Structure formats: C-alpha cells, structure tokens
Image (cartoon, grey):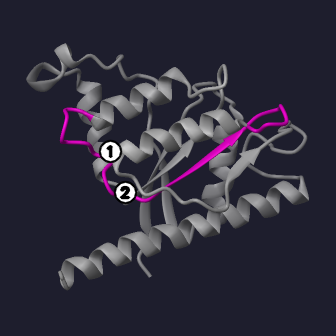
C-alpha cells in the first residue's frame, strides 16, 4: 500500500492551538498509511496579484511547491467570527493563483474544526468546503468533524486524547480520510491508465 503525503494546513497560528493538537492526533492515528506534514502558512504575505508572477514573494513559491508535492490536503479550521481565519483564507488564495495554476486542484481533502464552544467551528468548516468547490478539491463528506467542548483536560499539547468519545471520533475520522485519499488517488491512476 502506498503511503500518501498529506499537507496539513492549520488555520490557527497559535503555538499551542487545539487544531495543532488535533492534527497530531490524526497523524498518529494513520501514521502507517499517510505521512501528514504541516505546511507553514503564518509567514505568507497577504495575497496581492500585483506582487505575483516573476517578482512574487519567495514564500509564495515555497508554499505552492509544498502543496504541489503532496497527494492530499487536511484542513484544520478554527472559527473566527463565524468564518474562516484570515491566515487560512490567505493560504488558499496564494495556492489558487495565478489563475489556472492552482496547486490544490483535484487533491483529495478533509476538513475538521473544533472549539471550546459547543458548535465546534461549524461555520468555518463549511466556509473551507465552499472554497474547495471552486478549487476543484474533492472533500470527504462523512464523517463530518465539528469537535466542540475542547479543553486541555481532553486534549494534551502532544495530541494525546484522554476523552474516550473524542478519541474514537478522531480515529474514525482519520481512518475514513485515509480511505478517501486511497479511493481518489487510486481511481485517478486507473483513469490515467485506461482513459475512456
């Protein structure tokens, strides 16, 4: 079985964010099937088409290259003001440009969100999914992952989960995502070998 390389885009820039911890937990759950690598988004200058092209900031090229080298995408999307964080939206904009040269196209993806609140970042999760429609990114539909009531007691800084229900949900989500990536990548390879 091929071990797929997955880019993890964490919309939270906070050093000890819950999304970073959840990313670690997901990584541990499917370590034998996927190589999930965090891709830095905090140092990306705001996307500006006037600064793209030959004179684009070096961070644009590095980010695009990192995404292009991956088989799939894992989005961790905290919710700010019922929407996507500025950092994550900027990363999506940088990777999708120049027009017609998106590095995201056709890469299988999953989106998770979480919050100390009860809604679990539902709004931001769907904002990322909306972007993915235009990006031509096939997003895993089920299981949906809006993890609410997160706390240090449930989720340690190293990604260890002490809450049994959360732990089972994270493992189920991670395994379903690994299956989704296998399905999309394998299906695409078969189509390439045997075009209609």
Whether the magenta-drawn stretch holds residue 110 is answered as yes
- Dominant SS type (magenta): loop
At 56% from the left edge and 28% from the top edge, which residue is drawn? 84
At 49% from the left edge and 24% from the top edge, which residue is drawn? 87
Q: Secondary structure at mark 1?
A: helix
Q: Are marks 2 and 1 in contact (CB under 8 Å)?
A: no
Query: Is residue 141 shown above or below 52?
Result: below
Question: How many residues crowd around disc 1 within 10 Å: few (fewer than 14), some, or many (20 or more)?
Answer: some
Report the span colored magenta.
97-120
Say left or right for 62 vs 25: left
Q: Quadrant of the C terminus?
A: bottom left
Observer-side mark, 2 or 1, equals 2
Whether residue 164 can be seen here = yes
The picture places residue 92, in percent across and down from the top left corner, at 39, 34
At 60% from the left edge and 26% from the top edge, which residue is drawn? 83
Whether the magenta-drawn stretch holds residue 70 is answered as no
Whether residue 9 can be seen here = no
Q: Secondary structure at mark 2?
A: loop
The picture places residue 30, in percent across and down from the top left corner, at 60, 66
Q: Quadrant of the N terminus?
A: bottom left
At 43% from the left edge and 59% from the top edge, which residue is drawn? 108
Say left or right for 137 vs 128: left
Query: Considering depth in this image, is 138 or 55 the residue closer to the camera?
Result: 138
Q: Earlier in the sequence, mark 2 or mark 1?
A: 1
Question: How many residues crowd around disc 2 within 10 Å: few (fewer than 14), some, or many (20 or more)?
Answer: many
Structural distance between the alpha carbons of marks 2 and 1: 13 Å
The answer to which image quadrant residue 150 occupies is top right
The answer to which image quadrant residue 119 occupies is top right
The residue under label 2 is 107
The residue under label 1 is 66
The picture places residue 101, in percent across and down from the top left corner, at 19, 42
Say left or right for 186 vs 113: left
């Amino acid at each position: 079985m091929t071990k797929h390389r997955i880019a993890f885009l964490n919309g939270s820039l906070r050093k000890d964010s819950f999304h970073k911890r959840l990313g670690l937990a997901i990584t541990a759950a499917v370590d034998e099937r996927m190589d999930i690598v965090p891709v830095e988004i905090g140092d990306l200058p705001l996307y500006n088409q006037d600064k793209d092209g030959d004179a684009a900031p070096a961070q644009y090229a590095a980010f695009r290259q990192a995404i292009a080298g991956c088989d799939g995408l894992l989005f961790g999307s905290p919710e700010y003001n019922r929407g996507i964080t500025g950092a994550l939206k900027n990363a999506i904009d940088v990777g999708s440009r120049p027009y017609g040269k998106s590095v995201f196209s056709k890469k299988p993806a999953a989106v998770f969100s979480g919050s100390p609140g009860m809604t679990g970042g539902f709004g931001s999760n769907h904002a990322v999914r909306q972007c993915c429609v235009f990006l031509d990114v096939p997003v895993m539909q089920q299981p949906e992952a809006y993890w609410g009531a997160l706390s240090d007691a449930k989720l340690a800084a190293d990604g260890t989960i002490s809450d049994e229900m959360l732990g089972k949900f994270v493992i189920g989500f991670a395994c379903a995502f690994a299956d989704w990536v296998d399905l999309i990548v394998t299906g695409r390879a078969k189509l390439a070998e045997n075009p209609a």
